Amino acid sequence: MFERENAEMLARAAAKLEEGFAELPEFAANMSGAERIGEVLSLTAERLQNNYPYFHPLYAGQMLKPPHPVARLAYALAMHINPNNHALDGGRATSAMEKEVVREIAAMFGWQSCLGHLCGGGTMANLEALWVAGHLRRGKTILASEQAHYTHKRISGVLQMHCEAVVCDALGRMDLNALQQRLEQGDVGTVVATLGTTATGSVDPLPEILRLREKYGFRVHADAAYGGYFALVNNVDAAAAQAFARIAEVDSIVIDPHKHGLQPYGCGCVLFRDPAVGRLYKHDSPYTYFSSTELHLGEISLECSRPGAAAAALWATQKLLPLVKDGEFARALSRSRDAALALYRRAQQSKHFVTAFAPQLDIVIFAQRAASATESSALARRIFDAAARHDLHLAIAELPAKFWSETHGAMRLDRETITCLRSVLMKPEHLDWVDRIWERLEVAAAEVLHGAAQAR
Ligand SMILES: Cc1ncc(COP(=O)(O)O)c(C=O)c1O
């Protein structure tokens, strides 16, 4: 199921790669343990069986998306070279590929000239964005919504910068009144707008944040680690579309190709609108940067060694599926969005669940219907376990009860948060599986409720 055809394509491509080095004298690789590789690989496969089936549509839990086969193959191909994109000395071809893919990602956001590079992931990318923000707004506070990824608070700690949370509204977006009140107090250097929160896929109101920037003069950093690729699709909700339409006006953007960009883990990206921020990275290296006067990516990134294979994988993916509005890549992504809407409608009609708000991207949350938030929260964990016994894997989230303020009906909101079920419908196949996902979930919920009724 996984690799048979791909293995042949990889072997052909590896032979092609080898042709480029045909002039070199042959040598016998001195590889210890070669005769036992098959045996150890089989043991490895056995160990890897102990995972949720992330590749299957019945895995509809956390933000996990299988890489495209072309990405896996290009990554594996590049591993025959194992290039290091720190310096051109270590990865000439893949550094050029990285510069190309980063230009294409920037163009997706409407930027023609900017500074950017790949990195280990969203955390590292946001760290660089906040590090630059800290240099340009020394000693000033960073604001991010209470639903922003926790990484902003942690990173600010690492950078010894002050970070404050701005409360969210009932839709999980940064509350503009709360933001303005905090801005009035002064001392704010940067506002992080999350375009697609991790828990609910809510999109902060970027147009209004940009309007406040005119008055208060802060930097705007867009954390679009998860949501960024939705800039290409034509079926997100109107408020999200308006936010993506203005993204070119922010100062820095983070997007994770290893989330919706079909890449293996280890592929984040940070972009700065003003290429002049490159001066902040300036350093010399006594070991590298000798082979060329062209830009070495290590001169504009904080990480040193980085996998050139990640750039090769992304380059191959973007060649196959260019980042164009309503193109093949975008259409596949829009299926995730449709799947989320379909699941949301199912949950809305269900006697077992209470939805919060309509999804803006492809994440759906729903709580178990119960007499109180406390009871609902306890049941959610049990339904999560019961669903897993039916091979359906969802996620659990602890979210503000105010998200259900419009919909809770007779359910008493007796605690500040509700433990609810959460589903990230990241795979294009999810659209065809919504009915089967829902059937299993209803069966799991009925089993748990039946058990709870008998225990009373
Ligand atoms: C909005 C957002 N920002 C940052 C991150 C952190 O990214 P990473 O896990 O790649 O470090 C995530 C991860 O889910 C995210 O959703």
Image (cartoon, helix red, strand yellow):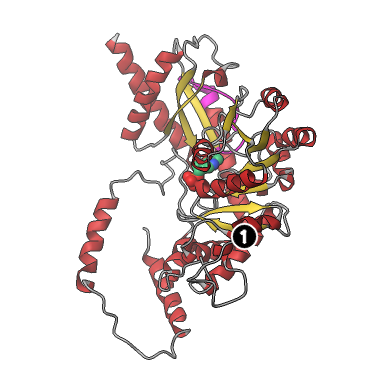
Residue at point 44%, 62% (across, down): 72
Measured from the top left, where is residue 235 in percent x and y?
A: 66, 41
Extent of the magenta region: 347-362
Asked whether 7 falls inside the magenta stretch, the response is: no
Quarter location, residue 14: bottom left
Measured from the top left, where is residue 140 in percent x and y?
A: 64, 36
Where is 261 relative to 307, above or below? Answer: above
Q: What is the quadrant of the C terminus in the image?
A: top left
Measured from the top left, where is residue 391 in percent x and y?
A: 34, 38
Asked whether 351 falls inside the magenta stretch, the response is: yes
Dominant SS type (magenta): loop
* Pointer 1 residue Cβ closer than 8 Å to ligand 1: no
Where is 134 relative to 116, above or below? Answer: above
- Number of labels in the image equals 1
Q: Residues within 10 Å of mark 1 (few under 14, many from 20)?
A: many
Q: What is the quadrant of the N terminus in the image?
A: bottom left
Say which of 414 and 136 sits in front. 136
Instruction: Quickly name the residue at label 1.
Output: 102
Residue at point 54%, 46% (across, down): 127
Element type where label 1 sits in the image: helix
Say which of 372 and 449 sits in front. 372
Say which of 84 and 286 sits in front. 286
Judge from the rendering whether residue 326 lies leftward or rightward of residue 49; answer left or right: right
Where is 94 relative to 188, above or below? Answer: below
Mark yes or no: residue 21 visible: yes
